[in-house]
Amino acid sequence: MATIPIMIVFDGETIQEKAGTGGSMDHPISLGGIQGNCIYMMAQNNYVVSDQAGAELNISAEPEDIVQWRATSIDRTNYSPILVEFDVSSGSQYISTAVDTLPTLYYYLSKDANNPDSGTQQASGLESIWQATVLNTGSVTYHWTLKLMDREGNVIGYYNWDPFITIHKPG
């Protein structure tokens, strides 16, 4: 059983400029027409079949593998993307429903950014990591709903897009 992490990088500025603001959890704004310009999905190369860093990602996985998704922004200073809902629209027999696990992650920072020899210090924080279990090989189309926040914590808008993954058995 493998864990396959997928990082989704959002261009918050492009989303706000091209898709606008607003929407709601029940009626998010679709990113379908612009997703290729503002959504970049990445995984470790050994799991990628095609479309590395595109809005669609085909991965290689086996039953019982765990797929994890997490979101970040190109500009984390001004925009915070939060994945808020996962919905499988076709292929639900191939993957379980994703759930947000909210683990505490630990990472290291330089004690002094101006002095690389200053040593490191541990930091931690909650991270929104959604995960689902691969049930079988096949094609899965799913919808993510995204809440985009500004640097003051105000909601810019709710958005969705319908990426797909094709789960191929390695070999």
Image (cartoon, helix red, strand yellow):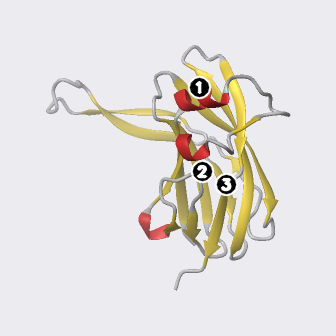
The residue under the point 54% across, 42% down is 37
- Label 1 amino acid? Glu
The residue under the point 44% across, 61% down is 44
Question: Quadrant of the rendered structure where residue 140 is?
Answer: bottom right
Above or below, 164 relative to 49: above
Question: Which residue is identified by label 2?
Answer: 69
Between tags 1 and 3, which lies in front?
A: 1
Distance between mark 2 and mark 3 Cα atoms: 12 Å
Answer with left or right where residue 21 lies relative to residue 69. Answer: right
- Label 2 amino acid? Trp
Q: Dot 1, how many residues are within 10 Å of its Cα: few (below 14), some (14-19), or many (20+)?
A: few
Answer with left or right where residue 51 lies relative to residue 30. Answer: left
Label 2 or label 1, whichever comes before in sequence order: 1
Label 2 secondary element:
strand
162 or 72: nearer the viewer: 162
Question: Which residue is identified by label 1?
Answer: 17
Label 3 secondary element:
loop
Position of residue 123 measured from the top left corner of the image (x, y, whole percent): 41, 32
